[in-house]
Amino acid sequence: MIRNIFQENSVHSYEPRDFLMEEFGRGSATYFSILYAISTGKTKVSDIAGVTDIKATSLQPYLYELRDVLNLIIYELPVTQKNKGINKKGIYKVNDNYMEFWFSKFYPVINQFELGNYEGVINNLIKSVNSIVPYKFEDICKEFLVYLNNNSSYLPFSISKIGKWWGKNKLEPNYNQEEIDIIAINDSTLDIIFSECKWSNKPVDTDVYSNLKMKSGMVPWNNDKRTEYFILFSKLGFTDRMKETAKLNNIILFDLVKMQEIIDSS
């Protein structure tokens, strides 16, 4: 697929560049730098400002164009956040997998490609795919939960909202940032799912569940009323110890084989 897109004289190699230049003309360089920043993990306004040399207070018009006009980026808040307006907890993400890959991996080496180093650039792009898959696995797992919610009774409750959560660990002196890959909730029944997605070359053990259980206590959402459920996703299955823990604690486990079986039988 990489070779089909990125090749000599292929119009697909430069589609994002050509699109932005057509939209913004001479001003496209600013949008290039913003999209590159977001694609490489600078997702907060302060971080974007730091690498683009644009004042944080001056970024909003550009972000508005990319988000609300062109739909190239999205603005996310922790899924349990009540106030959905723009605030310091929010992050920006590129809203298209190809666009994100193009800016994070191809854009930095586009000059080498234009100078004729096609094979070298393509080989590096192919290698870089492996570093992206773990993050995209979270998206796959999220889509799978949405699929289950809409097409089966496999889940313990009907989901009304699903997304990611992040926040400070107030149990530690440094208030380090913590994340939970997926949280799904029902605002009416006060049910909540905490989920972790692991794309690794070994089975998931109980330490992953223990860490998720610990982080679940940091999530400020109906803490004294909610009913909690836990779901773990794994590329290569689970240890016997984790399977036994799942039986004892009613934890739902999914690996790639199980996910495919459910989809095939639906």
Image: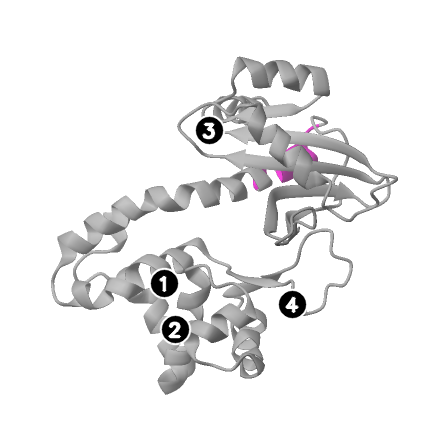
Point out the frontmost of discs 3 and 4: 4
Query: What type is the residue that disc 4 sits on?
Result: Lys
- Mark drawn on residue 103: 1
Q: Secondary structure at mark 1?
A: helix
Residue occupying the point 41% across, 60% down: 40
**Residue 30 quadrant:** bottom left
Q: What percent of the width, then of the height, locates residue 48?
A: 48, 71
Q: Secondary structure at mark 4?
A: loop
- Mark drawn on residue 48: none
Q: Residues within 10 Å of mark 4 (few under 14, many from 20)?
A: few
Boundaries of the magenta span: 143-152
Say which of 11 and 97 sits in front: 97
Q: Is residue 164 above or below residue 239?
A: below
Q: Is residue 12 above or below residue 130?
A: below
150 on left or right of 103: right
Query: What type is the residue that disc 1 sits on?
Result: Phe
**Labels 1 & 2 near each other (Cβ < 8 A):** yes
**Magenta segment: does it hold 151?**
yes
- Mark drawn on residue 32: 2
Q: Main secondary structure of the magenta part?
A: helix
Q: Which residue is mark 3?
A: 235
Query: What type is the residue that disc 2 sits on?
Result: Phe
Say which of 17 and 227 sits in front: 227
Query: What type is the residue that disc 3 sits on?
Result: Lys
Mark 3–mark 2 Cα distance, whole angstroms, equals 34 Å
